[in-house]
Image: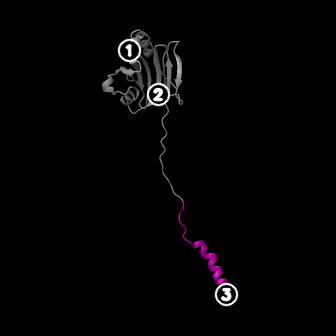
Amino acid sequence: MKKAFTFLCLLLIVSLTACSVKEDDTECLNDVYIVPSIPAFCVNAPLPEDAVMAAMTEDGQRIFYVHDDFTVCKETITAASAGEALLALTGRTQEELHPVTVATFPQEEYRYACTVAGEDGTEVCTGVLFFDGTHGYSLQITCDAEAEQAYRDVFAEILAGAVLDAV
């Protein structure tokens, strides 16, 4: 009888271990990963030959060109609207700037001008903004207020020649 009891216990141990309730140790996450959109264009303009590239951000979204009397900045930013892009670029709202709408198709194009306080006095900032619905492509020219009159034709030529090129 002792052998039968031992055999029955051994049989129960072997067969009942597979029937134990197991808990689920895994966890399922449904995270949403939003991939930032990549700019489809870059802004180009005919810059004077003596304007030298002085700095560029690591991602290439902001490039500075320096001339003796003025600075040109090409910049690409992500924005939900043209007003948001203008605010990010100039620190002023669209209502404060009163930009001139040059074109609305295929991209919106705005021209604007404002004055800012600089290190050596008042500076004038003139620029063009192209907006494609997700990104703002800007070309801004900044100079001292005294030098702006002498370079007005050069600035007008640069801004008139600004175009968007596909990346």
- The disc, 2 or 1, on the residue closer to the chain's N-terminal end is 2
Q: Is residue 150 visible?
A: yes
**Residue 40 appears at what percent x and percent y?**
49, 29
- 97 and 130: which one is in front? 97
Of labels 2 and 3, the one closer to you = 2
- 106 and 138: which one is in front? 138
**Residue 109 appears at what percent x and percent y?**
39, 22
Seen in the picture, residue 58 relative to 69 is either above or below; the reply is below
Colour scheme employed for the rendering of this structure: one colour
The label number, if any, that marks residue 116 in the structure image: none
Q: Which residue is mark 2?
A: 76
* Label 3, label 1: how far apart the Cα atoms are: 107 Å
Find the residue positioned furthest to the front. Answer: 120
* Label 2, label 1: how far apart the Cα atoms are: 26 Å
Q: Which residue is mark 3?
A: 4
Q: What amino acid type should be assigned to the residue bearing mark 3?
A: Ala
The answer to whether marks 2 and 1 mark residues whose Cβ atoms lie closer than 8 Å is no
Of labels 3 and 1, the one closer to you = 1
**Residue 2 appears at what percent x and percent y?**
67, 89
| Residue drawn 63% across the image and 78% down it | 13
Q: Secondary structure at mark 2?
A: strand
- 70 and 96: which one is in front? 70
Label 1 Cα neighbours within 10 Å, binned few <14 / some 14-19 / many ≥20: some
